[in-house]
Image: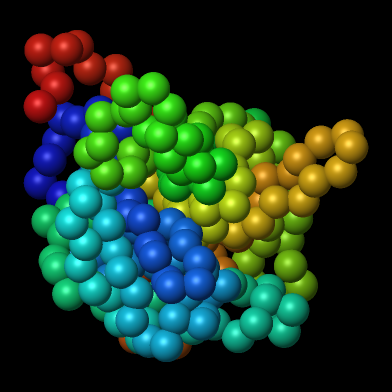
Amino acid sequence: SSSVTNVSLSDFLTKNVVFIYAGDGFGTGFFIDENKIVTNRHVVENAQGVVKVFRPNSGDSFDASVIGLSEDFSQSNADFAILLSSEPSPTFLSFAAKTNNLSLLPVISAGYPGDVIDTLIELDEDGEGVQSTGIPLFLTNGVINAVQNFQGEGAILLHSADISQGNSGGPLVNACGEVLGVNTFTRSDDVRTLNIALRADGLEAFLKEYGFVMNRSETECQPKVLSLNDRR
């Protein structure tokens, strides 16, 4: 998705995954081309058309306009929004090649969970505080535990890369940084917490309604382990 060939996964996600402040709430989004950002509908649906966007580790923000919303999840099995950014991004995320077997595939969630943000605020208020350089991107890893297809297009991906409120709209990616789905909600009981993403083909159908063709990889992910000297 960019001219950068050798870069760590963490660095790459930090360049492309953003924090979205929508007035009465917040969430995560990610660039899918130079000026378009994807997130969840429920993150921005009450934002009156414009949201504030922050890059990780920066206190500066820019505006993004809501240009498309899916129908409500209960009606469409979709929870997507597309934003037009006022500030272009030199890099962006692509989507993983389609595959029929996702079971136990290693995955990474990237986003800005509210419990982490609350903890950083508390640490800043206690003692000498923490160095304030903006909100850091929070990454968790796991595997895809199960896939449940919808009757139409799309599916839910149940995975073990921990997410919480604030991760909504953020990417679930493979080891190459290619998007497999959009983290959307969790479900908790006394036994476990389920982390749930909406698979990328549902997003692809939504984007087509707005004339956007998803940038998909044509080959299977084959990540490389780089030496420190190779990283830029």
Is residue 30 found left or right of 111 in the rendered image? left
- In the rendered view, how is the structure colored? rainbow
Tell me: residue 188, above or below residue 42: above
Q: Residue furthest right?
A: 190
Is residue 86 found left or right of 142 in the rendered image? left
Query: Camera-side residue: 218 or 6?
Result: 6
Residue 69 visible in the snapshot: yes
The location of residue 39, given as percent across then percent down, is 45, 66
Residue depicted at 12% across the width and 18% down the height: 230
Is residue 49 found left or right of 182 in the rendered image? left
Residue depicted at 88% across the width and 34% down the height: 191
Tell me: residue 205, above or below residue 139: below
Tell me: residue 181, above or below residue 84: above
Query: Camera-side residue: 13 or 205?
Result: 13
The location of residue 84, given as percent across then percent down, is 27, 77
The location of residue 213, given as percent across then percent down, is 34, 74
Residue depicted at 47% across the width and 62% down the height: 26
The location of residue 98, given as percent across then percent down, is 50, 53
Q: Quadrant of residue 88?
A: bottom left
Q: Quadrant of residue 53?
A: bottom left
Residue 175 visible in the snapshot: no
Query: Camera-side residue: 97 or 230?
Result: 230
In the rendered view of the protein, which quadrant contains the C terminus?
top left
